[in-house]
Image (spheres, grey):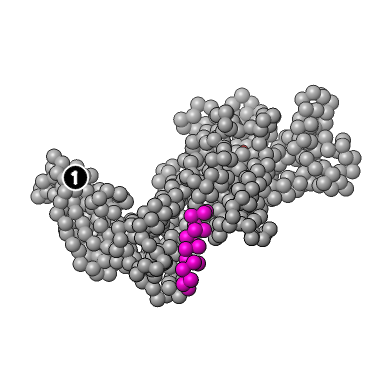
């Protein structure tokens, strides 16, 4: 029988400090409830506190353990009459804490917690003085590999690689912020049979290839297409190309040099894109792992994993009815052999505790099979709840207006550089139309246009759950209203201008001023700011950047529609406190931008 509401208990303020997770309200509450749960049901010592933020009128957070506990103890002589009575006991057994203002039990035993607004205010103030990095979450891993971007040599980077680059960079940034050492790995496709035809074709075009510079070769992708055409139509060329592969893999210097030259040209091109996007990565391409393949396959063979099937060497894994081919019937290695060597290297040489792969969902089965093979080999524990572990971060397609795969009008693959150019140019035109930008320097206009344009492209991608497909639409992503980077960047700039225009020295206020959260909307804003740390933790744990985007958008909405609409800042008696709230909001927003790889703007 559900009974609603409730007795309110006020708890005296006494310091319970937790230095480990100073920014994480949920974890601090969990510590208190852990004590209380032990006292409430001494016979069940390992119950984990279930704490959730809530938006209801009964409280800010909720402890949801009573129902589960009741079902465990109900046959026993405990004196409890049902979940609500368990909830009452959990509430009574809470140790005194300055965090909690009041508690109540509602419904089937939820323990609602109202946080102390003085405590919230103190937390915000401390953050302003000590810096927002003190709010970084703590994760159970020390070192991670994030394998992302990973384009292929001699082929254009396309929107799929854009998604991997944007999502991977954000995940790396969030983990780095959370004290994880991240090895950012660019697993470029720089090895394979396609190099035979490309090299042979270039030798034909440029008999002295070594002396030819990058500019003369120019568009590698065009050469790649042309060589493919020759390969498919000219048997004599095909034979030479296959011979070239043998020479390259045998390490013949002329072929090696040509290969290195081709890689260098692509690398320069990729690098330009990374620079524009502010992304940094370390290249360890397929060729890097190639020498490790024989040894790794030998080890798998010794463990009895490798079988013969239709001339190929394969590994069977549970739940998948096709085998993972690790040596093709012609004796060559493939994508899977390379990935097995790479994951071996990452676990054993680089000692990574979490290995994260960011590619489109189309590669899910590949990674599923690789991970299962690795677990069969005992390199990773079978239980996904344990570290070290490997995770595939899949993402959906980018669609065009027609709902089909995003293509240009002439149905070519969309080039990444063209997209970035257009985003920048569009935001530049919009900027020039604004009065405010009239007396900006050329450089200021350029920099802002880039921040807004690239930020818009990134945010439009990151705000969606990565598994869903999304439609690429410049008009939508560059709109200054709604859930867009433009709106958020402008909101941040506006907050900065409120502080500037007040004429107050904000650094001085941080030292001597005091925050109070007496108005409801001040309190709502303060609470939301305090939830930053647990949101980042959730985004990291589930590898979901959209969780952080949603938080950022809500922050901006609470600031604008609640706090700033209802609480006068400049000239009010609460001016100091409210300016500090503006500063705290801008600080948290900037950290969100940083984690999303977006460059903030300070003026509009
Ligand atoms: N080069 C591949 C592609 O363009 C992505 C590589 C992803 N990483 C990996 N370790 N397999 O599809």
Residue pictured at 43% horizontal, 47% vertical: 550
Q: Residue at x 60, y 33 (%)?
A: 406
Q: Main secondary structure of the magenta part?
A: helix
- Work out which residue is located at the far front of the displayed protein and give it: 435
Task: Work out whether residue 3 can be spotted.
Answer: yes
Position of 267 compared to 281: left or right? right
How far from the left and from the top, in percent, is residue 259? 77, 43
Q: Quadrant of residue 330?
A: top right
Residue 269 x/y as whole percent: 72, 47
Identity of the residue drawn at 47% across and 57% down:
589
Judge by depth and name the residue closer to the eye, 176 or 470: 470
Which quadrant of the render holds ligand 1?
top right
Is residue 447 something that shows in the picture?
Answer: no
Q: Position of residue 290 (x, y in %)?
A: 67, 44
Q: Residue furthest right?
A: 207
Q: Is residue 184 left or right of residue 24?
A: right
The residue that label 1 is drawn on is 107
The x, y position of residue 465, in whole percent, is: 47, 40
Q: Is residue 439 left or right of residue 403?
A: right
Q: Residue at x 19, y 48 (%)?
A: 106
Quadrant where the N terminus is found in the figure: top left
Quadrant of the drawing holding the C terminus = bottom right
Magenta stretch?
489-505
Query: From the viewer's perspective, is residue 109 above or below residue 121?
Result: above
Q: Quadrant of residue 230?
A: top right
Asked if residue 429 lies in the magenta stretch, the reply is: no
- Structural crowding at the residue carrying mark 1, measured as other residues with C-alpha within 10 Å and reported as few (<14), some (14–19) or many (≥20): some
**Labels in figure, total:** 1
At mark 1, the secondary structure is loop
Residue 494, magenta (yes or no): yes
């Amino acid at each position: 029988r559900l009974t609603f509401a409730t007795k309110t208990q006020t708890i005296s303020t006494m310091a319970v400090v937790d230095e480990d997770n100073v920014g994480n309200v949920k974890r601090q509450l969990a510590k208190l409830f852990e004590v209380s749960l032990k006292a409430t049901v001494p016979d069940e010592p390992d119950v984990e506190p279930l704490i959730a933020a809530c938006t209801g009128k009964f409280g800010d957070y909720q402890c949801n353990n009573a129902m589960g506990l009741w079902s465990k103890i109900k046959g026993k002589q405990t004196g409890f009459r049902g979940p609500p009575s368990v909830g009452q006991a959990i509430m009574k057994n809470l140790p005194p804490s300055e965090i909690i203002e009041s508690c109540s039990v509602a419904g089937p035993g939820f323990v609602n917690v109202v946080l102390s607004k003085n405590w919230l205010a103190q937390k915000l103030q401390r953050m302003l003085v000590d810096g927002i990095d003190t709010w970084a979450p703590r994760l159970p891993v020390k070192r991670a590999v994030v394998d992302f971007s990973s384009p292929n040599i001699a082929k254009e980077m396309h929107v799929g690689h854009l998604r991997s680059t944007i999502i991977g960079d954000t995940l790396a940034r969030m983990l780095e912020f959370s004290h994880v050492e991240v090895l950012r790995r660019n697993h470029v496709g720089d090895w394979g049979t396609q190099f035979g035809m490309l090299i042979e074709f270039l030798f034909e075009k440029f008999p002295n290839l070594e002396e030819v510079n990058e500019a003369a070769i120019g568009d590698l992708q065009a050469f790649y297409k042309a060589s493919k055409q020759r390969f498919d139509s000219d048997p004599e060329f095909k034979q030479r190309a296959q011979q070239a592969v043998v020479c390259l893999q045998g390490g013949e210097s002329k072929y090696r040099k040509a290969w290195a030259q081709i890689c260098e040209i692509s690398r320069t091109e990729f690098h330009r894109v990374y620079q524009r996007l502010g992304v940094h990565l370390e290249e360890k391409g397929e060729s890097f792992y190639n020498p490790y393949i024989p040894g790794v396959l030998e080890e798998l063979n010794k463990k009895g994993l490798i079988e013969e099937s239709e001339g190929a060497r394969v590994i069977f894994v549970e739940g998948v009815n096709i085998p993972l081919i690790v040596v093709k019937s012609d004796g060559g290695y493939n994508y899977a052999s390379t990935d097995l060597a790479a994951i071996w290297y990452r676990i054993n040489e680089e000692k990574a505790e979490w290995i994260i792969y960011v590619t489109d969902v189309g590669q899910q089965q590949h990674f599923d099979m690789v991970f299962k093979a690795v677990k069969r080999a005992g390199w990773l524990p079978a239980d996904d709840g344990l570290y070290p572990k490997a995770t595939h971060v899949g993402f959906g397609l980018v669609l065009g207006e027609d709902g089909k795969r995003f293509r240009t009008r002439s149905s070519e693959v969309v080039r990444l550089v063209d997209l970035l150019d257009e985003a920048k140019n569009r935001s530049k035109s919009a900027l020039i139309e604004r009065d405010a930008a009239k007396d900006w320097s050329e450089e200021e206009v350029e920099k802002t246009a880039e921040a807004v344009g690239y930020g818009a492209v990134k945010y439009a991608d990151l705000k969606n759950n990565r598994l869903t497909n999304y439609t690429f639409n410049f008009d939508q992503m560059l709109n200054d209203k709604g859930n867009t980077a433009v709106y958020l960047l402008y909101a941040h700039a506006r907050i900065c201008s409120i502080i500037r225009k007040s004429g107050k020295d904000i650094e001085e206020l941080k030292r001597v001023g005091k925050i109070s959260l007496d108005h409801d909307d001040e309190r709502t804003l303060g609470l939301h700011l305090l939830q930053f740390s647990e949101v980042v933790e959730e985004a990291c744990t589930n590898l979901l950047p959209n969780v952080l985007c949603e938080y950022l958008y809500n922050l901006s909405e609470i600031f604008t529609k609640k706090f700033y609409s209802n609480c006068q800042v400049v000239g009010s008696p609460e001016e100091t406190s409210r300016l500090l709230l503006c500063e705290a909001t801008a600080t948290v927003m900037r950290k969100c931008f940083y984690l999303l790889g977006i460059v903030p703007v300070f003026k509009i």
